[in-house]
Amino acid sequence: MGGTITHYMGKSYTGQGVKNFYKELIQEAKKVYFFKGPTSYRLTELLKEIGYAAIRRGKNMEWFYDPLHEELLEAVYILDTKTLYLQTDAADPTYYGAGHEWVPYYEAYDEERLKDLGPLIRDKQIANDVWLTKGLRTLSKAKTIHDEWEQLIQPAIDWDGINGLLAVLKKKCIGNVHLQKTPKVTHRLMGSLTPVGAQDTLKSISKNLKSRLYIKGLPGCGKSSFMKKFGEEAKLHGLDIRFIWCGLDANSVDGIVIPELQLCMVDATSPHIYDPERDGDEIVDFFPHIEQTLLDEKKIVEVKQRYVNEMELAQDYISTYAGDSKTIKMLYDSTIDEDKWTTLQDKMIATIE
């Protein structure tokens, strides 16, 4: 019987910089293989081969993607054995001989061909870093504008009404459940800005859950705080919690998953609009607790347009960066020694328990 795959973003491009949870994931894992070498599409093929081999053996997995390149994997995590295969510059091994292992693949390249292309790759990388810097700077400006947008909404919020709604959901969904164990708290990313706009993996994350609660509201009406409070309450009842963090605001939560309740709660407003489509889906409506007459619609429209403009500009910068990154990866991949690469792949597949 085959295992399952759940898909997540490996990192996100936010108003506060590039965010990932690999350090937390490394702490979860018992065994971590750290791949070290040039940026590559071929490493995705290797990681997928590891993944498919594990799936055939009935293992359940999580796959983590680079949001800038469709289908490009940064990591695969075998849940059953807590084994992580990872390529990232954001984390290094710390427990040598106790679960952490380097997997350098520099020797899998033809040294002469790499030397020939090296100066070209270097120049392209230096030039391309400028586009990422511009993209992140523009996302930071967009975040500042979004904060301004939220401040226009907040005076119209009936916070007592929101808190009352939270109390109702706690009673309805958690009730008198009390598990005699220490709850596990984990963190993942569901979405990010990509070359084609904001994208996420909610469909994969929620496919096996019975209940999906979709929060509908406006910026600044407390959706993230609402979910954090719900998650903290679940923890008090001994329930495991997975916080799904926002792909555009590093300090905001876009969703929570409570596996033991077979439930998730997500922000279902722009740019990730979701609506009920199956049994168990339900809207958590904040709009009855927003006094529309107190909103300065003209000012909101103006601020929203400025935000949209900055996000479109950021997407353009990120898209350019992604395109040039693809070229760099392909140049590196053109120098691979196929025999050495096959040897590396066979060696890594043999590590699957």
Image (cartoon, grey):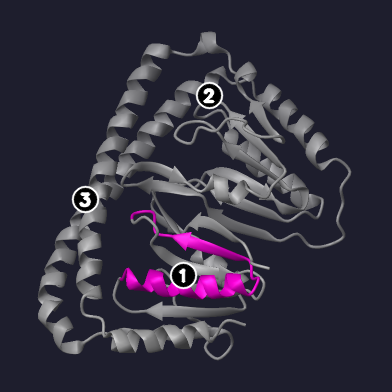
Which of 315/304 is in front? 315
Residue positioned 59% across, 34% down in the render: 223
Q: Which residues are magenta?
A: 40-68
In the displayed structure image, the side of residue 253 where residue 331 appears, left or right? left
Amino acid of disc 1: Lys
Q: Which mark is residue 48?
A: 1
Query: Which class describes the residues within 10 Å of circle 2: few (<14), some (14-19), or many (20+)?
Result: some
Q: Earlier in the sequence, mark 3 or mark 2?
A: 2
62 within the magenta span? yes
Q: Which residue is mark 3?
A: 320
Residue 114, image x, y percentages: 17, 82
Residue positioned 60% across, 19% down in the render: 287
| SS class, disc 3 | helix
Position of the N terminus by quadrant: bottom right
141 within the magenta span? no
| SS class, disc 2 | helix
User: What whole-number distance in Å separates the C-alpha atoms at marks 1 and 2?
Assistant: 46 Å
Amino acid of disc 2: Gln
Residues at circles 1 and 3 in contact by the CB criterion of under 8 Å: no
User: What whole-number distance in Å separates the C-alpha atoms at marks 3 and 2?
Assistant: 36 Å
Amino acid of disc 3: Thr
Q: Earlier in the sequence, mark 1 or mark 2?
A: 1
Residue 209, image x, y percentages: 69, 47
Q: Which residue is mark 2?
A: 154
Q: Is residue 70 above or below residue 272?
A: below
In the displayed structure image, the side of residue 43 where residue 174 appears, left or right? right
Q: Earlier in the sequence, mark 1 or mark 3?
A: 1
Residues at circles 1 and 2 in contact by the CB criterion of under 8 Å: no
Residue positioned 19% across, 59% down in the render: 128
Position of the C terminus by quadrant: bottom right
Q: Is residue 353 above or below residue 212?
A: below
Q: Nearer the viewer, mark 1 or mark 2?
A: 1
